[in-house]
Amino acid sequence: MKTRVNYISQTLVVGFFTLMVVIDFFPDIGINMSIVIMGGVTFIVLAFITRQIGKPVFKSSKQELIFTFFSGIYIFSLLIILSLLGGVSQAGIGLTNPIPWVIYLIGVLVSYTKYKKELKQTSNNGRGTCQ
């Protein structure tokens, strides 16, 4: 039950984040940003409370790399779609802003480095070094 609540909370956090970006691009849609922020914070806290302590978020660094890669694809796709629909970011978040690109690239590079390190350790452990 606790795992299901955690999964639902994490999914709703993504939904509230998406709604915040949509409101940023289209502020006249009639949804109050304060309510969306409160909902997002509520589900972040609920996800934190219901997480399994001691269990890693990702089973492997490969899974982390895949998650990081596709999370960025999702965010940049969202920005492209909202821009094509005629929205303009009030906060300056967009494809021409270098900050999201730099953050994304750093995240992918860190995940890739961890993946390569884990891959190297796995291959070294499998060889059985003789001393």
Image (tube, rainbow, N blue to C red):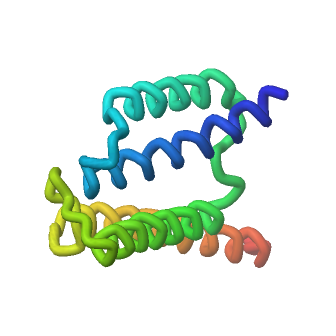
Which residue is depicted at the point 55% across and 29% down? 43
Q: Relative to residue 30, is residue 99 depicted above or below?
A: below
> Total label count?
0
On the image, the x and y values in percent for residue 2 come to 78, 27
On the image, the x and y values in percent for residue 57 come to 64, 45
Which residue is depicted at the point 62% across and 21% down? 49
Point out the image quarter for the C terminus.
Answer: bottom right
Residue sitting farthest toward the right: 1
Give whichever of 41, 24 is nearer the camera. 24
Instruction: State the image quarter where residue 10 is shown.
Output: top right
Point out the image quarter for the N terminus.
Answer: top right
Q: Is residue 108 left or right of residue 85?
A: right
Q: Relative to residue 32, is residue 124 depicted above or below?
A: below
Give whichever of 85, 67 is nearer the camera. 85
Which residue is depicted at the point 67% across and 30% down? 51
- Work out whether residue 102 can be spotted: no
Q: Is residue 74 left or right of residue 50?
A: left
Q: Relative to residue 74, is residue 127 depicted above or below?
A: below
On the image, the x and y values in percent for residue 50 come to 68, 25
Which residue is depicted at the point 34% across and 65% down? 104
On the image, the x and y values in percent for residue 123 come to 70, 76
